[in-house]
Amino acid sequence: MPPPISRKKIGNGADSREFLKKRSALAEKINSELYCSEKGYYCDYDFKLRRFTNRLSPASFMPLFSNIADAEKGARMKALAENPKCFYKGMPTISYSSRHYNSSKYWRGPCWLNTAYFAVRGLYNYGYKKLAQKYIENILGWCSENSDSIYEYYDSETGKGLGAADFGWSSVFIVELILLKYGKNII
């Protein structure tokens, strides 16, 4: 498990103690209410229907990005990231195995660089650097192959640029992926 957030980053006063207390309570709640032990992954929970949605998405990796998953949960998420029926190797916005999946349909399957980055960064945080690097190489390769522009999102099977061209926030995540590729940690 990655190191806990350091007091050095947030200071040593009463505010930091309160922040760490709230962070711990939220982490506990996320791990108890948004981790489906039956399925072995994090997913949305419908409190009205009182059941998990069972939808796998890059958001399922946010507890790894936030450094709040225990090592066992991190390992289970890694297994999903390695699975070609789930996310490997294009980190689609919904798992490849979902009946809603479509590699080029907006939020139903393409690779969005923002959500992919958070998932890849989570894997990296938990020491799965080789796997994270494979994702980085693939995603940056897609960006490079689309030399005419930086796109809003990319087909999660072919890497074809989709949506708006010259998309600013995608640029930010290309930079973040490059920094992560070369071990530059700015977070």
Image: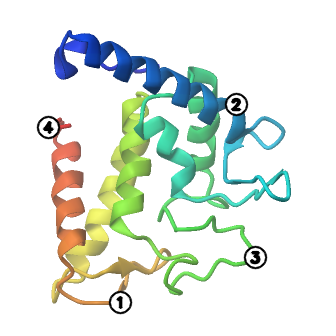
Q: Amino acid at mark 4?
A: Lys
Q: Which quadrant of the view contains residue 103?
A: bottom right
Q: Position of residue 27 (x, y in %)?
A: 53, 28
The mark closer to the camera, 4 or 1, is 1
Above or below: residue 140 compared with residue 119 = below
Q: Are marks 2 and 3 in contact (CB under 8 Å)?
A: no
Q: Amino acid at mark 2?
A: Ser
Q: Which residue is mark 2?
A: 32
Q: Residues within 10 Å of mark 2 (few under 14, many from 20)?
A: few
Q: Which residue is mark 4?
A: 184
Q: Residues within 10 Å of mark 4 (few under 14, many from 20)?
A: few
Of the numbered discs 2 and 3, the one sitting upstream in the chain is 2
Element assignment for label 2: helix
Q: Which residue is mark 3?
A: 99
Above or below: residue 121 compared with residue 160 = above
Q: Are marks 4 and 1 in contact (CB under 8 Å)?
A: no
Q: Which quadrant of the view contains residue 115?
A: bottom left
The span from disc 4 to disc 1 (Cα, nearest Å) is: 29 Å
Extreme residue in the front direction: 14
The mark closer to the camera, 1 or 2, is 2
Q: Which dot marks residue 163? A: 1
Q: Residues within 10 Å of mark 3 (few under 14, many from 20)?
A: few
The mark closer to the camera, 2 or 3, is 2
Given residues 60 and 91, the one toward you in this image is 60
Which quadrant: the C terminus?
Answer: top left
Q: Is residue 98 left or right of residue 166?
A: right
Element assignment for label 4: loop
Of the numbered discs 3 and 1, the one sitting upstream in the chain is 3
Q: Is residue 62 left or right of residue 182?
A: right
Q: Are marks 1 and 2 in contact (CB under 8 Å)?
A: no
Q: Amino acid at mark 3?
A: Arg
Q: Residue at x 60, y 25 (%)?
A: 28
